[in-house]
Image (cartoon, grey):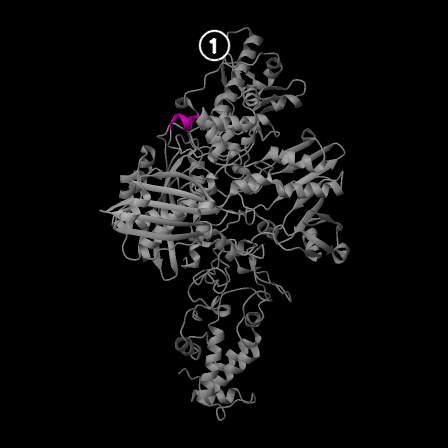
Amino acid sequence: MGRIKTIARRSFLVGSAAILGGVAFGTYMYKREVENPLEAGLADGEVTFNPFVKIDAKGVTLITPRADVGQGAYSVQAHLIAAELDVDLDQVRIDPGPPSAAYYNGVVAVEGMPIAATSETFLARAGRGASDVVGKLMGLQLTGGSSTVPDMYDRLRMAGAVARETLISAAATQTGLAVDQLRTEKGAVVLPDGTRLDYVDLAAVAVETPVVEDVVLRDPATWQSLGKPHQRTDILAKSTGTQEYGIDLKMDAMVHATTRTNPAIGGGILGFDATEAKTMRGVQAVLMITGGIAVVADNTWRAFQAADAVACEWGPSPYVGDTEQQFAAVAESFIEERQDSRFKDEGDVTAALETAETVLEAEYRIPYLAHAPLEPMSVVVKLSADRLDIWTGTQIPRFVQDGAAALSGLDSEQVHLHVLMSGGSFGRRLEDDYVRQAVEIAMQLPDTPIKMVWTREEDMTHDFPRPLAMSRARGAVADGAVQGFDLSIAAPSVTESSLGRLGQPAMGPDVAIVAGAWDQPFAIPHYRVTGYRVPAMVPVSSWRSVGASGNGFLHESFMDELCHAAGVDPLAERLRLCSDDLSRAVLEEVGKMSDWGRDLGPKRGRGLAFTLAFGVPTAQVVEVSDTPDGIRIDKVFVVAEVGRVLDPVNFEAQLSGGVIWGLGHAMNCELTYEGGVAQQDNFHAFEAMRLYQTPQIEVRGLENGEKIRGIGEPGVPPAAPALGNAIFAATGQRIRELPFSKSVDFA
Amino acid sequence: MRGLLFALLIAGTGASAQTVTREEGLAAWDRIYEVASHPRCTNCHVGAQEAPMWQGLTYGDSAKHGMGVKADESRIGAESMPCRTCHVTAVGRDIGSPSAPQIEEAWRLPPVELDWLEESSASLCAQLRDPALNDGHDIAQLAEHLRSSPFVAWGFEPGAGRSKPVGSVEEMARDVEIWGAAGSPCQ
């Protein structure tokens, strides 16, 4: 057990202070049942069996507490419950539920631990168990890290099964029949003679029925819907433009606000002149908030216009505020004092590199990247004397609740958070800065519903970006094989930055600095991955696929260089080195799919990359053509291993989306700073992959693993290196800095 | 003969075949080419290609208009989605970058034969002096087109934040006349 403490001390655990603070207390708290938050609000005749199912006179409600930021989380959660409860989704309501400790995430904290997904040692298992303890102790309600499916897979099916069996028990009580004579179907308990007792009608009896907890989950072979293509619960609304997002919420007597804070990050406001803005049509107030001003008007557009007319005197940014200086700080961080981790150190790298016949060295750079969700940050708040209501799309409901409570002086129980559908996030909604601004406005304008909306420019220039990073890699090849790989990565710490904003401690090394690099399943004889922590510069945060998003590029591009230097085929060499059966199957499958080895003809090239991230081995092959107009991406093949595919359609959508996201940013995007001011303020300067540039994408999911995994993020990391490797194959040009558009044009 | 004809056409403008030397004509052509090959012009003079270019912006030299537009045979996108869906016709508005530029006419691509994109000076010169290749214009009509076209006017005053070619509409029209008066020399 001593080693578990060591792991806790040496690695970032969300709320690790809670564990270290007292094991006895922690054990007690951990073993205690979590409260069911639905019990607090039950009316007469309403019944809840667990935190995920509620039945009242109007029908059945499934609670789907993981945020839907476009990845289909509501849909998959609903399907998991429904698979056991026997309801059709068009019969039920889906509700994200209130913020509650019951909705803790027991999986996500493992991403902060230095535990390789392929490791099944005692310590690795113990560490994963500790993640569940941390999540439960903290009541860590958080959506992220591709954790929704692995975390909720058993819990939601169990919730559905408990509700089903309790309803059957209620029906048995009501009819006098034996439980084994009853079955369930489409929202009703069915009697032997075919009579249907609707769940809704049974609710009153179920209130008095002891909850049946001893249930057996159904064999996946009997699933009716899970595992087969199904229509997402939001697809009709999204396809017809009727889906309402947070930004669409309207209320009677609502006023509209927007804010301007210092474009030089963290520079604060010294003073402002709102004389002109106050005379503008519809403007009701110009208020001071932390770091800037807020304008309240009768509609959002007028608030935007008036905010532009406020003359603000800004202070200078306290951060290292020029991108050139920022990269210089990264370059200076490859020193012993800043070494953060060395989770991988096999063989004798130093000796191998000293004696090798051929040694390669290369330096790679990746830029800051904004999240830039299509729906900019927005929130509706209403504050009265003893109650604060907040409506917004968020991945961290309990942090939002607690932060707003602290700011407004209310207790957390007095803060009512209503989670709404998000128009994208990619990690941006792991922050609550925009909610705090709205609460500050509400404190100056109580008893009024206030919708606060940021402009795109405010959103992009006040993002907490993915950090920039550099790698210095050295490698040794001999006898047609990769013999040594020494990868050093320097980056600011995402975990330190974002946990700091949430008031949480972050101790030990930051796994995110080397995620997707240190834990790759290759048995290279001499293999070392070292993380260096760059002192904090502009505040940074998690971005889709977090550390692996950039580290995939740093690791897999250099791996390609080594393979070419050794004169070996990149796929064959990876297969030779592969130390994990699941990963090998993924590599073999992508080779088959892409007909790897087939000659593509002149001016064409094919690149392979593989990343094991979030426990998901993912391989991609990108095919490109070198045309007179530039590089054209023709086709991408993707294979991922997730244990079990719950919805083939959404699986394909998530992986394809990850590829497009990864490729688009690698091609075109960087966030640069001058004087602490982000230089790219809208999509024209931070360009997504265009429709005409989008390649054919062929997706395949493998289900060989025992563990079920999430698929929102793993599609991203291999995309950039697969493209870079393909460009090299087509043109001979090795590009070591993103975005690629700095070096080549894209057709 | 062509030089003499042009001299007559431009009588009264101050330039004449008698006073415009070949060297002056070539110098005028160089200035014309500098404008005509500027991305502000070549982004729309794209020939058979159906999408305008976005050169000279931040998207790289080969970047085409990003919204998947097609000008189609009408060159205004009438068969698919008219350019004016976004390039709303507007009067007197200074639409800065990166908003969709607007002028007081329906946005469109020039005729296919007026393909200037990546054309050399010699090639563009030969094209412009030949009515069969320049949409049927003689030199006087070319000058008149420059002076009257909202597109050309916009090209020289494209709104805040956009690069623009050197000179003005009038200077370019005068250069065309000088070039024509000198016999439209190309080299």
Q: Is residue A298 visible?
A: no
The secondary structure making up most of the magenta span is helix
Q: Residue furthest bottom?
A: B18
Q: Extreme front residue here?
A: A337
> In front here: A326 or A198?
A326
Q: How many numbered callouts?
A: 1
Placement of A416 over or under A460, stated as above or below: above
Per the image, the residue denoted by label 1 is: A180
- Residue B32 lies in magenta, yes or no? no
Q: Position of residue A221 (x, y in %)?
A: 39, 23
Which chain contains the residue that carries disc 1? A
Give the magenta-colored segment's residue range. A120-126
Q: Nearer the viewer, residue A278 or A613?
A: A613
| Residue A45 figure quarter | top right
Q: Nearer the viewer, residue A65 or A460?
A: A460
Residue B166 in view (yes/no) = yes
Q: Quadrant of residue A141?
A: top right
User: Regarding mark 1 in the picture, which secondary structure is present there?
Assistant: helix
Binning the other alpha carbons within 10 Å of mark 1 as few (below 14), some (14 to 19) or many (20 upward) gives few
Q: Position of residue A573 (x, y in %)?
A: 27, 43
Provide residue A44's location: percent of width, then percent of height. 67, 18
Q: Amino acid at mark 1?
A: Asp
Q: Check the image and report above or below for B90 versus A528.
A: below
Task: Tell me if residue A121 is in the magenta stretch.
Answer: yes
The N terminus of chain A, quarter of image:
top left
